[in-house]
Image (cartoon, coloured by chain):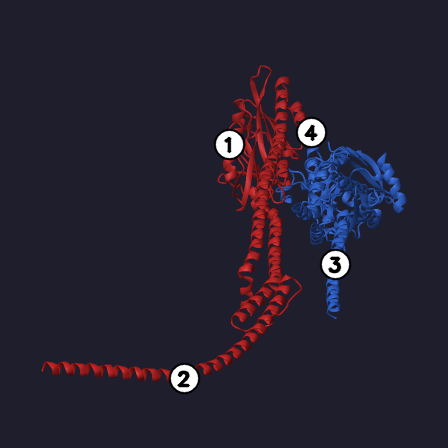
């Protein structure tokens, strides 16, 4: 009787010990599996304007294509993409949204690369945040030089890098090239009297000033330079003021949602004969679609070359894009593709899931054989590419005219 | 009961059993502490090596960067001097080439021997490039015209970046100074280097100039405050050229181990510091293991004490109790038998012994009683014999007394007879 009781007690103890061991084993195994899963996946977060305007989707398509070609892998890592939208209902970038996206990226330990934003003003918001987190940021579309270069606005670019490390890179040339190239192109076409409107944003105001500066140096007559209310839908007043001046060119420095369409329409409606020119901020189908006939003949400068005109690798990209999306790539699709490939290469070279190491690898990218030719990142994080091209709206399409030079 | 139990544990045998174990535990603890100390020493040494390596790496990186620019400018000034290209257009073109080639150079100017700028190029600023000035009163001109390479202190430019000026003499083929080449240089890569380099997990690097002012650190805002760090021990060591790794409190009020390396071309110092907290953090695992071992030891001691108490000391205490009972005469005491071991056998033997003892005791009492009876009987017999004897004795004594009396009578009679005769 006593033995039976003892045996029963012993059995309970054995059961308890076995249960405990199983529990420990389970925790260990599940921990390893979980760890393995997290360790093997790297997230790339994109922040682009995805509403109303095409450019965000164009860039995202380029990024997605690069990832698909790489089978969502970089070295030993699985790549996951998180697409965020930093635009409001009107399609314009929002400070709060960009801030929130950057904070989200910074807080997620799996996010190793931040691709975006498109607007330079938005970049001014996110760079200091990613900088403090040591997270590499690659922009496919910011062209404001002050984001990386000294010599444009006070406190820029130093203010964007509170740690002193340069974590921001861009695969597209800047307006330090595009602005002067536009002025030189205008001069080359025989224009003399120029009036400048800008949308007051980092990009618009910036490129407007650069254009003006160069225009004056090369002998163009800058009749006036005005910042418009970007939210206004009617610029009749502003245009009536200049109607009687003999103008050859009206240069709009800004992006499509910030008044480009009512401005170009107003010019036509008021019968102003001056030609219209703008930077790549308006080089998207939405500008033509919304502006209609008024956009016909408009001159547009763009960093890089339209994908259709690319050769070699670029041509291959253009053809694959057509097959994949059944539509023409946008101006910035190629830069999106380039930015994603740069990120993948850096992750592969780093070989570890570590922001600092991946950042270092991005900064080391030299002689990269890209869509626009071979280029390198300089110490400021800028591409060595200086290609700018000029296009014109013909029959509701942007048609490549020529390669432009800043000198 | 509890006090009794404790008393049992700390009884002589209890202590004899527990003390060796306590000694072993104590020795183990000493061993663990020794190991931790040894590890700490190794870590401190390895940290010293790591810091030295990092400071060397950082200083050579910055040194290389600055030296490269100085060499480039030096070569350029020679080129201008030797080819006598003091012609404005040619100069502007060469300046432009140099600026395009090197993104670190923000502006360049060529000055005549009198101090007038002949050509100037400021990056992206065509207007500033065209504003030629007289710089004859400036330090950079004065030093360079004397034939020296002049490197200014670092300053924060209007673009919030670290800049510094370099000026060099321009010499002709006869090595005669004919002008000065000066440049403003962007030192952002130095900030990048200092911020990028990490020493273990929490360590960091910073750069001070020849006066002990902070010129590069991972927190740019602190650098902008132009902090004077010459009172910090690590910086003091650098300024006094004393090469040693030392523990001190740094500018962020943290206790650190620090070392330094100089950037020779500019005579600035790279200071590498690691908060001591991290070293202890690394040791915390060991401390945890040690603590865990102590807890386990204590638990083991308790378990062993319980076992000793239950299996050995308690039966012994029963035995002792039994012996005491027997000592006090309770031969009927029956000891509890707790096991089959030697102590159990001992208890059973004890019980048997007390049983036997009790039986013998009873027998003894019975014998005693019988003896008493015999004694009473014999006593009675003796009493009667004694009485008889007493009677006989009394008779003998009466005769004796009679004899004595008769003798006394005779003596008296004799005396009377003598007296009578005398008379």
Which of these two is toward me, A122 or A252? Answer: A122
- What is the count of numbered marks? 4
- The answer to whether dots 4 and 2 both sit on one chain is yes
Q: Residue pushed farthest top?
A: B174
Q: Are marks 3 and 2 in contact (CB under 8 Å)?
A: no
**Nearer to the camera, B307 or A257:** B307
Mark 4 or mark 2: whose residue is earlier in sequence: 4
Question: Label 2 lies in what chain?
Answer: B
Where does residue B190 sit, x and y in percent of width and height?
Answer: 62, 36
**Mark on residue B241?**
1
Give the labeled residue for mark 2.
Answer: B388
Can marks 2 and 1 be said to lie on one chain? Answer: yes
Quadrant of the rendered image containing residue A358? top right
What hue does chain A carry in this figure?
blue
When the figure is inspected, residue A111 is found, relative to residue A372, above or below; the finding is below
Residue B92 in the image, given as x and y percentages of width and height: 66, 26
Label 1 crowd bin: few (<14), some (14–19), many (20+), radius 10 Å: few
Q: For marks 4 and 1, give the one nearer the viewer.
A: 1
How many other residues sit within 10 Å of disc 4, few (<14), some (14-19) or many (≥20)? Answer: few
Subunit ID for the residue under disc 4: B
Label 4 and label 1 in one chain: yes
Query: SS of the residue at dot 3?
Result: helix
Q: Which residue is mark 3?
A: A23
Are the numbered discs 3 and 2 placed on the same chain, yes or no? Answer: no
The answer to whether one can see residue A262 in this image is: no
Q: Quadrant of residue A332?
A: top right
């Amino acid at each position: 009787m006593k033995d039976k009781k003892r045996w029963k007690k012993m059995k309970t103890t054995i059961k308890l010990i076995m249960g405990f061991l199983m529990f420990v084993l389970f925790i260990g195994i599940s921990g390893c599996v979980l760890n393995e899963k997290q360790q093997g996946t790297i997230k790339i977060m994109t922040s682009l304007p995805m509403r109303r305007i095409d450019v965000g989707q164009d860039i995202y398509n380029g990024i997605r294509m690069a990832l698909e070609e790489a089978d969502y892998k970089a070295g030993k890592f699985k790549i996951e993409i998180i697409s965020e939208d930093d635009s409001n209902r009107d399609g314009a970038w929002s400070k709060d949204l960009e801030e929130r996206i950057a904070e989200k990226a910074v807080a997620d330990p799996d996010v190793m690369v931040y691709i975006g934003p498109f607007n330079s003003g938005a970049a001014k918001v996110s760079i200091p945040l990613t900088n403090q987190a040591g997270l590499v940021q690659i922009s496919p579309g910011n062209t404001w030089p002050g984001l990386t270069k000294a010599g444009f606005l006070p406190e820029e670019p130093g203010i964007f890098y509170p740690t002193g490390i340069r974590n921001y890179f861009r695969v597209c040339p800047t307006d330090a090239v595009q602005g002067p190239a536009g002025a030189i192109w205008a001069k080359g076409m025989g224009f003399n009297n120029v009036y400048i409107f800008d949308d007051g944003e980092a990009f618009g105001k910036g490129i407007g000033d650069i254009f003006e500066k160069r225009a004056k140096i090369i002998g163009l007559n800058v009749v006036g330079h005005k910042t418009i209310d970007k939210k206004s839908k009617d610029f009749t007043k502003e245009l009536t003021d200049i109607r009687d001046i003999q103008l050859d060119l009206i240069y709009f420095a800004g992006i499509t949602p910030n008044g480009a369409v009512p401005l170009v329409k107003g010019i036509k409606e008021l019968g102003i004969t001056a030609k219209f020119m703008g930077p790549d901020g308006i080089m998207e189908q939405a500008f033509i679609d919304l502006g209609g006939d008024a956009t016909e003949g408009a001159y547009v400068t763009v960093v890089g070359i339209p994908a259709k005109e690319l050769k070699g690798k670029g041509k291959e990209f253009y053809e694959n894009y057509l097959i994949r999306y059944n539509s023409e790539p946008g101006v910035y699709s190629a830069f999106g593709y380039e930015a994603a490939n740069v990120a993948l290469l850096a992750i592969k070279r780093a070989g570890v899931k570590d922001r600092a190491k991946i950042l270092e690898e991005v900064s080391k990218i030299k002689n990269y054989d890209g869509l626009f030719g071979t280029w390198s990142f300089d110490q400021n994080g800028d591409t060595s590419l200086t290609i700018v091209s000029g296009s014109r709206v013909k029959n509701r399409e942007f048609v490549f005219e020529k390669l432009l030079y800043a000198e | 009961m509890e006090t009794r139990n404790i008393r049992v544990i700390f009884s002589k045998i209890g202590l004899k059993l527990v003390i060796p174990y306590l000694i072993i535990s104590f020795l183990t603890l000493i061993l663990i502490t020794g190991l931790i100390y040894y590890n700490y020493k190794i870590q401190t040494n390895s940290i010293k090596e790591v810091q030295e390596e990092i400071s060397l790496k950082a200083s050579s990186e910055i040194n290389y960067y600055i030296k490269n620019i100085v060499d480039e400018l030096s070569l350029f000034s020679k080129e201008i001097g030797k080819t006598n290209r003091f012609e404005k257009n040619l100069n502007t073109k060469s300046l432009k080439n140099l600026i395009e080639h090197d993104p670190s150079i923000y502006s360049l100017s060529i000055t005549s021997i009198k101090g007038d700028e002949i050509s100037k190029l400021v990056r992206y600023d065509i207007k500033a490039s065209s504003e030629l000035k007289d710089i004859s009163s400036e330090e950079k001109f004065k030093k360079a015209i004397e034939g020296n390479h002049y490197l200014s202190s670092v300053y924060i430019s209007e673009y919030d970046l670290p800049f510094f000026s370099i000026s060099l003499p321009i010499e002709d083929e006869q090595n005669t100074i004919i002008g000065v080449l000066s440049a403003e240089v962007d030192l952002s890569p130095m900030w990048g280097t200092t911020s990028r380099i990490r020493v273990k997990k929490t360590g960091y690097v910073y750069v001070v100039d020849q006066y002990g002012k902070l010129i590069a650190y991972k927190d740019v805002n602190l650098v902008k405050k132009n902090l004077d760090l010459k009172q910090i021990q690590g910086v003091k060591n650098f300024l006094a050229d004393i090469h040693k790794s030392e523990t001190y409190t740094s500018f962020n009020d943290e206790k650190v181990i620090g070392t330094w390396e100089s950037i020779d071309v500019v005579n600035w110092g790279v200071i590498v510091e690691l908060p001591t907290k991290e070293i202890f953090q690394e040791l915390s695992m060991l401390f945890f293991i040690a603590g865990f071992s102590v807890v386990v030891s204590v638990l083991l001691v308790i378990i062993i004490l319980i076992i000793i108490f239950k299996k050995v000391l308690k039966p012994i205490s029963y035995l002792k109790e039994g012996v005491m009972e027997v000592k006090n005469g309770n031969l009927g005491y029956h000891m509890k038998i707790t096991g089959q071991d030697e102590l159990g056998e001992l208890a059973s033997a004890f019980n048997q012994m007390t049983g036997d003892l009790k039986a013998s005791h009873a027998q003894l009492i019975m014998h005693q009683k019988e003896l008493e009876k015999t004694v009473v009987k014999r006593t009675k017999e003796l009493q009667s014999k004694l009485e008889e004897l007493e009677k006989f004795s009394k008779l003998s004594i009466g005769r004796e007394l009679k004899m004595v009396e008769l003798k006394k009578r005779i003596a008296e009679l004799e005396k009377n007879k003598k007296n009578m005769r005398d008379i």
